Amino acid sequence: MASWSEFAADEPRLADGIRVLLQQYGPGFGYLATVRADGGPRVHPVSPVITAEGLFCFIIDSPKRRDLERDGRYALHSFPAEESDDEAYVAGRARPVTDPVRVALLAQSARAEPQVDWRLFEFTVDVAMLTRREQQVAGIPGLPPGRPAVRVWLDPNAPAAVAAPLTVPQTRPTRLSRDVQCTAAA
C-alpha cells in the first residue's frame, strides 16, 4: 500500500493531474465510495486534503466513517469538471491517523472545525487513474477523435487482486492500447 507521497514521487505528472481535478474548486471535492456492512457500496461527497505527506480526509460521525473503521477499502472519484469530462480516480485503504501532533497540524492547515466530531483518515493508493477526454490535452498520435486518454498506475506492492491486469471491455481490443498506459514502480 503506497502512500500518496510515494505514488506522487513515482508518477508526479499523474499525481498532479489527479490533484488538480480533486482541487479544481479550491478545497478538495470528490465522491468517496465505501463498503457497507452488507458488502454493498455507499457513496458520499467529501473534501479530501492532499499535502506533501499524503492524501487525507476528515470524516464526521456517519455511516461512511463506520464503513471505513470496519472495512478500510475506499474509492475516491473527482467531482465532474465544468470545462471538460476529465475524471480522476484513486482507490486503496483508509487508515485512521492516531498521532495527535500530526492530526493537530493537518486540522490547523485544513481549518478543520475543532468542535465537530471528526476523525482523520489517511488514504493509501493501490490504484490511480486519470482520464482526459480533450484531444488537445491527450496529445496521443493516432488516437481516434472522442476516445479518452487514460493513464493508470498500479501499486506493485498491492495485493494481487488489486494489481491484476486491467479488464478491458469487449468493445476494445484485448490488449492494452496506446490510450491506456499502465505504470508501476519498479
Image: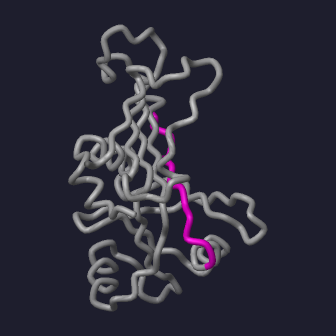
Q: How is the image coloured?
A: one colour
Q: Quadrant of the N terminus?
A: bottom left
Q: Would you identify the image quadrant in which residue 168 lies?
A: top right
Q: Is residue 80 magenta?
A: yes
**What residue is drawn where x is 31% and y is 86%?**
104
Q: Is residue 177 magenta?
A: no
x, y percentage for residue 67?
64, 73
Compared with residue 140, is residue 110 higher up or lower down, i.e. above or below? below
**Residue toward you, 14 or 64:** 14
Compared with residue 48, is residue 167 higher up or lower down, i.e. above or below? above
**What residue is drawn where x is 50% and y is 82%?**
118
User: With 19 as the anchor, is 160 left or right in this view?
Assistant: right
x, y percentage for residue 148?
45, 23
User: With 36 as the anchor, is 120 left or right in this view?
Assistant: left
Q: Would you identify the image quadrant in which residue 177 lies?
A: top left
| Count of numbered circles on the image | 0
x, y percentage for residue 85?
48, 30
Span colored in magenta: 70-82
x, y percentage for residue 182?
38, 36
**What residue is drawn where x is 43% and y is 55%?**
126
**What residue is drawn where x is 33% and y is 40%?**
183
Q: Would you identify the image quadrant in which residue 38 lies?
A: bottom right
